[in-house]
Image (cartoon, helix red, strand yellow):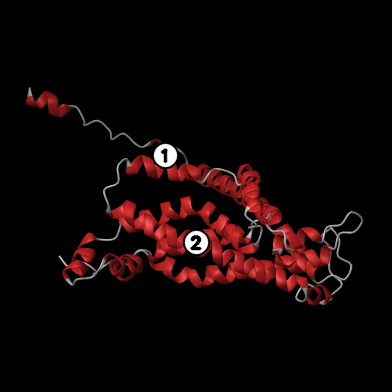
Amino acid sequence: MTESIAAYPPPAAVQPVAELVPEETRSAAERREMLIVNGLLGLLGILFLAPMLWIFFASVDSDASYALSWPHFTLSHFREVTRGDFLLSLVNTLLLSVIASAVSTIAAILGGYALSRRRVPLSDELMVAILFLTGIPLAIMIVPVFQIYAQYNLLNLWATGVFLGVCSLPFALWLIKTGMDAVPKELEEAARIEQANILQIILHVTVPVALPSIFAAIIYSFINAWGAFLPPLVLISDQAQITGPIKIYGLIGNSDIRYGDIAAFSLIYSLPVVVLYILMSRPFSGGFSMGGAVKG
């Protein structure tokens, strides 16, 4: 019996399907697939690059138009949009964005700490509702807010900044609360042993560790207010307080569109956001650096 079993050779190992395909065919198919993917990505890149090229070229073109063409070099557009009402509109936009960021971030820090460290009934459902509030468009709130502001004589830059800060609050609260959930509670317990009060714990223990989420909330609130068009247009009645987007809109007339000034002002208008991103990129690169904060 043993000899009869030994007479049969062992079955051959089953080869994977990939090994059954010739190497040349497989490599050709991969090259074809890579070529298609790279081609589609290149096409998308060109579509995104074309408007940026138009902005750069039109900003230094004395004969700027809607078409993308090689510029006739001039700096007159930049000289025009860096003085007078244009410069004032940039200052107004910066002030509006700072007010909105301060309102949303301070309120989100206090509210996020309460939701993260206190036993709030239905806190999970509340966070879902808060996240849902971020999807409500501003346009449906403009008319009632305008009526309230007009009744109490609040059609100005400061009140509009507060309104934009409140609109950014739900997402900022969600971001900061999520960041505070990752802060070890042992750090706060150690601070309580040292007789620290609740405000000292928030400012000196929780906030420094949760800085990445706080910076994310600041950037979100700032950019949301920086690019706002409809709220400042409706809620600001003083022409001396108009913001950058409204000033850009004013460059589009019925019979004349100042393409060069629009392009130059758009470049200058985007610089604060780029600077903010550069300043905030370092805290993001490290993430939540809590290693070694709590000893085992």
Q: Residue at x 69, y 63 (%)?
A: 243
Q: Is residue 58 visible?
A: no
Q: Residue at x 44, y 45 (%)?
A: 130
Image quarter in which the N terminus is found: top left
Foreground residue, 104 or 209? 104
Number of the front mark, 2 or 1: 2
Q: Position of residue 47 (x, y in %)?
A: 70, 53
Residue at the spot of label 2:
103
Q: Which mark is residue 18?
A: 1
Q: Position of residue 155 (x, y in %)?
A: 66, 57
Tell me if residue 286 comes above or below residue 74 in the rendering. Answer: above
- Labels 2 and 1: the sequence-earlier one: 1
Looking at the rendered structure, the secondary structure element under dot 1 is helix
> In the image, is 80 to the left or to the right of 89?
right
Q: Position of residue 142 (x, y in %)?
A: 64, 47
Dot 1 crowding, Cα within 10 Å, few <14, some 14–19, many 20+: few
> In the image, is 123 to the left or to the right of 32?
left
> In the image, is 280 to the left or to the right of 264?
left
Residue furthest left as drawn: 1
Q: Position of residue 278 (x, y in %)?
A: 53, 71
Dot 2 crowding, Cα within 10 Å, few <14, some 14–19, many 20+: many
Q: Is residue 65 visible?
A: yes
Q: Amino acid at mark 1?
A: Ala
Q: Quadrant of residue 19?
A: top left
